[in-house]
Image (spheres, rainbow, N blue to C red):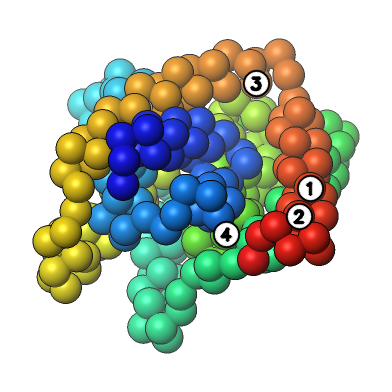
Amino acid sequence: MIPWNAILLGIIEGITEFLPISSTGHLLIAEQWLGARSDLFNVVIQSGAILAVTLIYWRRLWALASGLGERANRAYVGKLVLAFAVTAVLGFIAVTLGFKLPTSVLPVAWALVLGGIWMLAAEAIAARLKPGREVSWAVALVVGVAQMAAGIFPGLSRSASTIFAAMLAGTRDRSAATDFSFIVGIPTMFAAGAYELWHVLRHGGAQHEHWGALGVAFVVSTVTAFIAVKWLLGYIKTHRYTLFAWYRIVLGTVLFGALSLGWMR
């Protein structure tokens, strides 16, 4: 892998990992022109994006960890643990059954379009419901399931699935729903990344890796994700997620066209 490829993939991962537009889907699309990436490369650039979000939320994370004596903090942490546990159990079942992500673009196109339509509908429904910032135990449970669903269907987007699952399950405030989605994503994605890294190293997947390109991609992904998430958190204070929904629908439609013309597989 030449450096410019690593830089471009790091940018794609950093922008798309936490925006509700699917990093897995975008990286699959990028593979059509940039070539397939190694599993280790995928884990490393994803870790960069997770590190960026951890840095953004470090004050909140410290407040939760150091404030467990307060009932509200204990409850919030408990809900994070529940969502993580649900995802972990479902993920273990999927791995045990031998589930593997599809590598073709067609399911990504479907997930982008249907996910965009679902986001538009969810925004409309949430706007008619009673406002509320509370993250309930039911919300935590639904978010855990949504994380696993996003892991099974490339293009669905973990952030989109969890944010809108939270909003429809009771956390109407999109900032509160986004915060919970991103914070629970930190241990979830670090755990998934650690498992993938262990699997890759165990089977000798690091022997032929281009470590220079890997390091560059990690740094680029971290910086890009930090900027993207900081922007998003400010944007959603005064805007809905409608822009991202339409982006998904347009991109998915373009992918269907490219597939019909034989430009992609």
Looking at the image, residue 244 lies above or below residue 196: above
Q: Earlier in the sequence, mark 1 or mark 3?
A: 3
Q: Nearer the viewer, residue 74 or 39?
A: 39
Relative side of 261 to 87, left or right: right
Q: Nearer the viewer, mark 1 or mark 4?
A: 1
Q: Earlier in the sequence, mark 1 or mark 4?
A: 4
Q: Are marks 3 and 2 in contact (CB under 8 Å)?
A: no
Q: Which mark is residue 258?
A: 2
In the rendered image, residue 97, in percent from the top left (x then y), is placed at 42, 86
In the rendered image, residue 226, in percent from the top left (x then y), is placed at 40, 22
Q: Nearer the viewer, residue 31 or 147?
A: 31
Q: Nearer the viewer, mark 2 or mark 4?
A: 2
Residue drawn at (38%, 77%) of the image: 95
User: How far is mark 1 from mark 3, CA to CA?
Assistant: 26 Å
User: How far is mark 4 from mark 3, CA to CA?
Assistant: 24 Å
Q: Amino acid at mark 3?
A: Ile
Give the residue number, with chain letter if any, for mark 3: 236
In the rendered image, residue 211, in percent from the top left (x then y), is placed at 16, 43
Q: Amino acid at mark 2?
A: Ala
